[in-house]
Image (tube, rainbow, N blue to C red):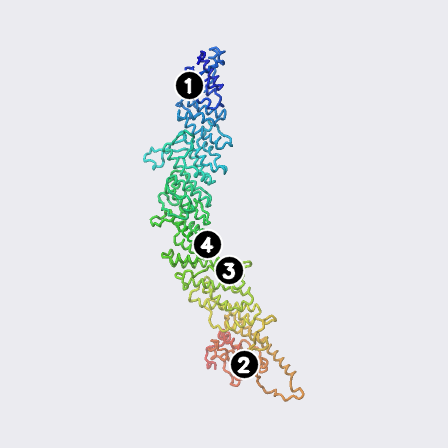
């Protein structure tokens, strides 16, 4: 090769600048090889940095730079240098031009270039900045830097931690998004801001959910390989080291990435789940080929622990109470457990079917209610026991996730945090409330008719109580389950109620009566059966016992435990009979609201319901015996039938009196109902047969205010055209008006016997008016008969035989009211006449009246035997009724008449 023409140092420099400007790397390489003493490495790198166009691809000049760095620059063979650019210059002119050159310095623009950085490293870094800023050739930087990775660790660190994340973020992963920062600006960003920028587009579109792990592995992970982004702080927790000089690693940018992950869990848990599923942690970082970098051991421990902690925190922060969300939380737990080499079932469904026992947790690590605050504060702090990655925290989180899943699947939506509150705060009321909601939803499930469904549900509820671990008396206050503070007996009783309400009687008997070890005592079973029956009764809408809710009032499901001799069972049976009896009638207590069974049980006066039945059902009063049986069942059921206020369950001593009192009241109701429907005949028969024969006294404290009123109302009843006709007359008068008045007098006589003293005056007034009406009717009938006899006298007919002597009295074969009127014409009697007549003939009248026997000795002596015979012959039914009524009057109001009932007869003389 021919030697180049001799050139001065100034011309050599100018020629090198010329070749660099023209990107003539071959000529520059030849010039450098021949003038190595002038074109030193630093000078050539400055010339390249200043004058080599940034648009030139690195593969054009990287070999030259690489050879220059190794002092192996060789001129290409058989290629003469073109010195035309400097030939016309003198040395002085060349020197002046060289002095005017403004070559860039190889000094640092940031922390990446310092005094210790060699010239080649500085050149590469500065060249990279200029390529990105001037030409936008960030994607060409790996080609520039990769050949020099072994030259300096700074180049490798810069390429991996700065160039690679920004290159992937702007050109590979999200090329459609405009770049916000240049390479130099990105490198100078605060750590947290830089990571925030790297993850700004992560997970924003559903299409990118499959690339979440890629972003952490390819963006955040490489960014961490820079010691300048790490800090060391004194350890606060002495567990790291016994020495006060122990240091803890921290990385603000990494913490920002973890905060992003936790935030996504609270906003869109699927993003957090996909990220954790797709990235196995800081041990798996995507670097470029031919690059091998490792974290220091403290750094790696910090990264692994903090990543696992953020994953656990994400599970706590999932806000949705759905099975999908809880399955996602469980997958997070399983992933972290597998990263920590712990076994866990990856499928939540299978874990829910197995329900493996979970050991009790240390009270010192998880201090009860205080643990609940850890779910809300400082989730990423190393001191948080819930998220510190260890076997205890993972087991606890899995237990909470599984508990929330069981509740949610059963229709009681529950998040992990809600399950934690139940388990940590241990509020009995809250736990009982959730338990009741759970069992109520189980009872509403369409599968409630399947015994296998209930067996599984019972096992799940019991697992929720203690998480499958045996009870330890020494573990008071320990975290045992979301129902840990609720007694096992209470839980079993609620389950039994649910089984009974779902008609699972055989299963309930096998569990709570036939099992070798009964989970409930006999008393608990009895009370539960009673409460369940009453609950079904209260919720029933149809009073018919064979349908609807009353059909579930089974009180004979446990023959060995719940016998019919129990008072509570007897009352329920009577209540069911009473309710069923009402199902045969139309009954509306409030407009638009049909009668429901619970009304009977809570009614303050259930007997009054019978009155409503009589009002709303025609001819219902004819079924008196059914109503009496209904009232008797109400008393047996313990309903408040007594007139004493506040007395709901009558004692045995007064129950018979209440039955009698209720019977009188019901009879009175039927009498009134019959009168309202113009059925005097039925009302009269009830008065005579039910009230007229009753000699029992009213119980003390319970005034019989119904019977005498009913009898009085019957006595006041006036016959009309719409009144029902009698079905037979018997020995009564053929005149319906007279017969009706006689029956009214009988009713009034009954009212006199049973009315309280304060009401006698009113009854007597009615009695007298009725008697006057009867006398008038009898006289009127007698007058009509006389007129008929006069009109039909046989003696006025031709050829008639002689009739009987009208002066001779011949008694009629059938003494009618008219004949009796012809025998004696009596006027209505006054109150005092009534009393004297009663005293005279009381012993001859109704012997059924117990008080008349004592009055016989106190009556007035008859004047003569002949007069007595005459009175006896002239005795009429009206007189009998009057005397029977006034007999009681003498004993009841003797003080008014001045009579002495108990005085012997001889004292009167």
Q: Is residue 273 above or below residue 638?
A: above
The nearer-to-camera label among 2 and 1 is 1
| Residue wearing tag 1 | 73
Q: Is residue 109 above or below residue 490?
A: above
Q: CA distance from mark 4 to mark 3?
A: 22 Å
Q: Are marks 4 and 2 in contact (CB under 8 Å)?
A: no
SS class, disc 1 = loop
Around disc 1, counting alpha carbons within 10 Å, would you say few (fewer than 14), some (14 to 19), or many (20 or more)?
many
Give the residue at mark 2.
875
- Image check: 302 left or right of 745? left
Q: Nearer the viewer, mark 4 or mark 2?
A: 4
Q: Nearer the viewer, residue 638 or 750?
A: 638
Q: In which quadrant is the N terminus drawn?
A: top left
Q: Is residue 99 visible?
A: no
Picture quadrant where residue 66 is located: top left
Precedes in sequence: disc 2 or disc 1? 1
**Residue designated by label 4:** 448
- Label 4 vs 3, first from the N-terminus: 4
Q: Earlier in the sequence, mark 4 or mark 2?
A: 4
């Amino acid at each position: 090769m021919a030697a180049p023409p001799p050139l001065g140092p100034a011309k050599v420099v100018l020629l090198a600048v010329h070749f660099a400007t023209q990107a003539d790397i071959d000529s520059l390489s030849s010039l450098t090889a021949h003038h190595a003493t002038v074109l030193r490495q630093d000078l050539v790198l400055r010339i390249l940095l200043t004058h080599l166009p940034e648009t030139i691809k690195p593969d054009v000049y990287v070999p030259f730079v690489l050879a220059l760095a190794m002092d192996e620059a060789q001129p290409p063979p058989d290629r003469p240098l073109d010195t035309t650019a400097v030939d016309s210059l003198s040395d002085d002119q060349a020197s002046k031009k060289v002095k005017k050159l403004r070559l860039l310095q190889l000094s640092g623009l940031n922390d990446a270039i310092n005094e210790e950085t060699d010239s080649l490293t500085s050149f590469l870094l500065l060249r990279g900045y200029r390529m990105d800023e001037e030409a936008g050739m960030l994607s060409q930087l790996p080609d520039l830097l990769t050949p020099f990775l072994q030259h300096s660790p700074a180049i490798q660190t810069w390429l991996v931690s700065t160039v690679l994340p920004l290159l992937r973020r702007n050109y590979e992963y999200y090329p459609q998004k405009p770049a916000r920062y240049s390479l130099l600006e990105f490198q100078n960003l605060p750590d947290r801001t830089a990571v925030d920028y790297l993850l700004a587009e992560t997970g924003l579109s559903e299409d990118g959910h499959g690339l979440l792990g890629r972003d952490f592995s390819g963006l955040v992970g490489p960014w961490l390989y820079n010691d300048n982004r790490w800090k060391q702080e004194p350890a606060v927790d002495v567990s790291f080291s016994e020495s006060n000089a122990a240091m803890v690693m921290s990385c603000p940018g990494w913490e920002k990435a973890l905060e992003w992950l936790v935030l996504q869990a609270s906003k869109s848990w699927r993003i957090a789940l996909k990220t954790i599923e797709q990235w196995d942690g800081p041990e798996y970082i995507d670097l470029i080929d031919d690059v091998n970098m490792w974290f220091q051991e403290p750094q790696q421990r910090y990264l692994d622990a903090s990543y696992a902690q953020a994953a656990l925190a994400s599970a706590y922060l999932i806000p949705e109470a759905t099975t999908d969300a809880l399955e996602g939380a469980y997958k997070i737990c399983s992933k972290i457990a597998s990263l920590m080499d712990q076994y866990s079932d990856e499928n939540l469904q299978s874990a829910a079917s197995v329900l493996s026992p979970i050991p009790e947790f240390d009270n010192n690590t998880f201090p009860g209610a205080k643990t609940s605050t850890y779910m809300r504060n400082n989730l990423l702090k190393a001191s948080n026991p819930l998220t510190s990655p260890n076997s205890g925290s993972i087991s606890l989180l899995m237990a909470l996730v599984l508990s929330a899943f069981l509740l949610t699947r059963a229709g009681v939506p529950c998040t992990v945090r809600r399950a934690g509150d139940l388990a940590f705060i241990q509020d009995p009321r809250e736990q009982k409330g959730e338990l009741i909601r759970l069992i109520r939803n189980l009872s509403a499930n369409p599968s409630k008719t399947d015994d296998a469904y209930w067996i599984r549900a019972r096992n799940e509820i019991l697992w929720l109580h203690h998480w499958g671990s045996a009870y330890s008396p020494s573990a008071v206050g320990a975290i045992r389950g979301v129902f840990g503070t609720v007694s096992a007996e209470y839980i079993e009783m609620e389950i039994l109620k649910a089984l009974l309400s779902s008609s699972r009687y055989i299963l309930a008997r096998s569990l709570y009566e036939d099992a070798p070890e009964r989970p409930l005592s006999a008393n608990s079973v009895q009370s539960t059966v009673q409460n369940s029956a009453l609950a079904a009764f209260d919720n029933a809408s149809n009073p018919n016992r064979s349908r609807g809710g009353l059909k579930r009032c089974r009180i004979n499901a446990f023959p060995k435990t719940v016998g019919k001799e129990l008072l509570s069972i007897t009352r329920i049976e009577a209540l069911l009979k009473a309710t069923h009896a009402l199902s045969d009638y139309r009954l509306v207590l409030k407009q638009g609201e049909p009668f429901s069974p619970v009304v009977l049980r809570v009614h303050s006066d259930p007997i009054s319901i019978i009155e409503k039945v009589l009002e709303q059902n025609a001819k219902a009063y004819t079924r008196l015996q059914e109503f009496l049986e209904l009232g008797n069942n109400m008393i047996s059921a313990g309903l408040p039938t007594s007139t004493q206020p506040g007395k709901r369950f009558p004692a045995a001593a007064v129950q018979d009196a209440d039955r009698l009192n209720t019977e009188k009241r019901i009879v009175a109701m039927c009498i009134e109902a019959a009168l309202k429907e113009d059925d005097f005949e039925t009302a009269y028969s009830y008065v005579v047969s039910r009230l007229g024969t009753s000699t029992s006294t009213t119980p003390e404290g319970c005034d019989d205010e119904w019977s005498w009123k009913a009898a009085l109302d019957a006595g006041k009843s006036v016959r009309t055209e719409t009144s029902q006709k009698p079905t037979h007359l018997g020995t009564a008068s053929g005149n319906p008006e007279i017969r009706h008045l006689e029956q009214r007098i009988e009713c009034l006589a009954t009212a006199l016997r049973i009315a309280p003293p304060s009401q006698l005056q009113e009854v007597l007034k009615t009695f007298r008016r009725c008697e006057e009406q009867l006398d008038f009717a009898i006289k009127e009938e007698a007058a009509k008969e006389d007129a008929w006899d006069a009109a039909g006298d046989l003696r006025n007919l031709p050829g008639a035989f002689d009739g009987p002597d009208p002066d001779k009295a011949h008694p009629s074969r059938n003494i009618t009211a008219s004949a009796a009127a012809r025998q004696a014409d009596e006027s209505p009697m006054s109150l005092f006449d009534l009393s004297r007549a009663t005293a005279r003939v009381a012993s001859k009248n109704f012997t059924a009246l117990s008080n008349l026997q004592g009055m016989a000795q106190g009556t007035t002596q008859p004047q003569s035997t002949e007069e007595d015979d005459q009175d006896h012959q002239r005795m009429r039914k009206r007189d009998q009724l009057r005397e029977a009524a006034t007999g009681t009057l003498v004993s009841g109001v003797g003080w008014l008449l001045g009579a002495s009932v108990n005085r012997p007869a001889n004292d009167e003389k």
